[in-house]
Image (cartoon, rainbow, N blue to C red):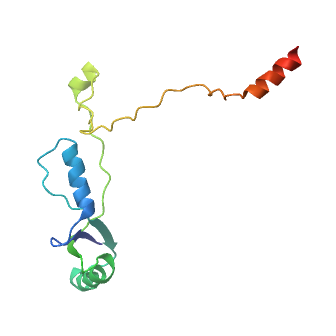
Amino acid sequence: MIRAQVIVRPRASIFDPQGDAVQRAIQHLGFSAIKQAHVGKFIELELDANDASTVRAQLESICKDLLSNPVIEDYALTFEASAPVLAKKPAKPSKSAKKNKTPATKPKTAAFKPVKKAKAPKTGKAAKPRSAKISRTKKARKK
């Protein structure tokens, strides 16, 4: 089995509005080291073939005609021969971790935590304004 990766990006001479928006948003968050961003596509293909040289010509044609727009985009095609993936056994905790009843490794924490949106305060149903005519008729009925 052959695995092919295709990365499609806008050409350097073409303005990338999506990349520009990403760059501005990152700078707005306080990361001023970002000077330029480009947004593209990543396509991974798994092929049931053994000869990469015959498949490469076909994939070049597919990339040029289908996966990218040659007028405004460039693509990079890479190959890797993959072996069957075997399931890994979970690591056994160390003896000291068993005694202390603490995990052998620290749990992974996300570097970026999304900010929760503030909810609007809940209020009861707003009272509908009544006209003076309706209120007079109800008073008249009560008498």
Q: In the displayed structure, does residue 100 sit left or right of residue 117?
A: left
Q: State the count of labels.
A: 0
Q: Quadrant of residue 78?
A: bottom left
Image location (x, y in percent) of residue 22: 25, 54
Foreground residue among 128 and 141: 141
Q: Quadrant of residue 129?
A: top right
Image location (x, y in percent) of residue 2: 27, 73
Image location (x, y in percent) of residue 136: 80, 22
Which residue: 23% across, 60% down? 19
Foreground residue among 74 and 88: 74
Which residue: 29% across, 66% down? 41
Which residue: 21% across, 62% down? 38
Which image quadrant: the N terminus? bottom left
Image location (x, y in percent) of residue 110: 27, 38
In the image as oriented, which residue stretches furthest toward the top? 143
Foreground residue among 107 and 93: 107
Foreground residue among 70 and 134: 134
Which residue: 23% across, 39% down? 111
Q: In the displayed structure, does residue 137 sit left or right of residue 93?
A: right
Q: Is residue 82 above or below residue 29?
A: below
Q: Is residue 113 above or below residue 46?
A: above
